[in-house]
Amino acid sequence: MSDERIWTAAVLIIGDEILSGRTQDKNVAQIATWLDVQGIRLREVRIVPDVEEEIVAALDALRARYDYLFTTGGIGPTHDDITVDAVAKALGVGVVIHPAARAILERYYSKRGGELTEARLRMARVPDGADLIPNRMSGAPGIRLGNLFLMAGVPHITAGMLDALTGELEGGAPLIAHTIGAWAPESEVADLLRQGERDHPAVAIGSYPFFREGRTGANFVIRSTDAAAVAACTAMLTDGLEAAGFAVTDGGI
Amino acid sequence: MSDERIWTAAVLIIGDEILSGRTQDKNVAQIATWLDVQGIRLREVRIVPDVEEEIVAALDALRARYDYLFTTGGIGPTHDDITVDAVAKALGVGVVIHPAARAILERYYSKRGGELTEARLRMARVPDGADLIPNRMSGAPGIRLGNLFLMAGVPHITAGMLDALTGELEGGAPLIAHTIGAWAPESEVADLLRQGERDHPAVAIGSYPFFREGRTGANFVIRSTDAAAVAACTAMLTDGLEAAGFAVTDGGI
């Protein structure tokens, strides 16, 4: 498996509301989970404020480094929605009204008895050369420009855009993950985990402790693109935990 | 208010479990909210995998740029807990066993009838010169080194560490935020919001649309360190929304 091409992605979250603590981000988890299924690894996330030069700097750093870059937030109709302008600046292209986006918005608002005001028309602005990502939820589409994907800040709208992109992106073998859990303090099984990674170089083992019902336990996630390696490592850890006197819950606790 | 020193912070989340989508991060929101009260603005967040060179690169970039840097994750007893080593490398110092941390762990495990094994003793390792951040929850302390704060990945443990740091960090005037909500499509009030920021340069207005009960609405958050400016801008927006036929809910919907 070692000569396999690994496809990577980053997420750039544009949002004062996340940095102020007002809003709990939910896009990282949903994009990460979706990427896993596409055979693409999320390798880095950055959250920056609604400030053009910060967005441009992050776009430049992340675009150069990963196969795909997703942004969330800042594509609505208001003054703080500056993602399109920042992307156009980073790419050195102009901003244009996308005719299909304009048509979608006209249809959307005429159905609802509204007009395509100047503010609403802002949602049809795209960096020159961009394609649209359909948005079944609210009219305003997402934007795709090569390997750059501009998604909504509102999680359920981004979910719809991800649906529309499913199967469209080239990826590698999906990452397979198997979880087992035990009421074991992780400090008592640290050596076993280390041994597991040594014996199975194709896997990565994550250890996630918790404290519940007055007791400490941990879940162990065994990840690899190689299903046989995941199975072998899971068996080895299960045996080791049981030998140390810990009952193992397959699938995690 | 414009000549006031603004104190800034960044958060670096170290965690494969967040990037895989397995775990929903909750530390950004709680650290952000806590920083607001300390008069410190969270300006950037990065999430990187459990890979030493990635952590070191992010530490270098963020340390140089902000007044304070908080990390979460990677300070437990297992093989994937490499934050202390990465920080020591970034700072060019060695790793030592902190005598007070060792004493805390000895006390913690002897009370529970356990031993301070080699794996557990890993949780007493700190970059040379570091102080401890008390952890009432689970023995293993957080680590402070100048303006760098190494916190736990488990949110309720980090919450306890933040409690211990309350009032300890120099900050500026806390940011004051006032929220109002209306069942108004944000595209219909975009001009009003723009006008609000123009007339009140000391404030920043965030617009957060939602779709509930089959209707669209938005909350508007007016933020500033200047309480009078927040009040004036809130009054102006409330008047403008009501003049446009939208009832305003103080505190947000």
Image: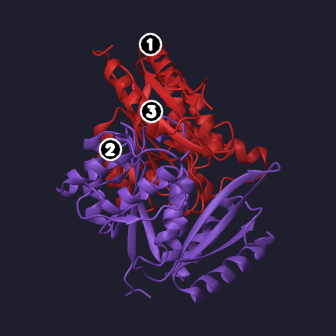
Chain colours: A red, B purple
Using the numbered discs, state the Cα–Cα distance from disc 3 to disc 1 in whole angstroms. Answer: 18 Å
Looking at this view, is A171 or A233 the one in front? A233
Q: Quadrant of the C terminus of chain B?
A: bottom right
In the rendered image of this protein, does residue B79 appear above or below residue A170?
below
Q: Do the residues indicated by labels 3 and 2 lie within the same chain of the protein?
A: no
Instruction: Give the residue pinned by disc 3.
Output: A189
Whole-angstrom CA distance, mark 2 to mark 1, is: 25 Å
Within 10 Å of disc 1 (Cα), the crowding (few <14, some 14-19, many 20+) is some
Point out the tag, 3 or 1, that comes first from the N-terminus. 3
Q: What residue is shown with label 2? A: B82
Q: Position of residue A237 (x, y in %)?
A: 47, 21
Label ID, residue B246: none
Image height of A190 relative to B165, above or below: above
| Viewer-proximal residue among A64 and A125 | A64
Q: Look at the image and tell me in which quarter the N terminus of chain B lies.
A: bottom left
Pointers 3 and 1 within a single chain? yes
| Residue that carries the numbered disc 1 in the rendered image | A232
Residue A251 lies, in percent from the top left, at 61, 24
Query: In this picture, is B225 found above or below A137?
Result: below
Return the chain for callout 1. A
| A221 on left or right of A164 | left
Helix, strand or loop status at disc 3: helix
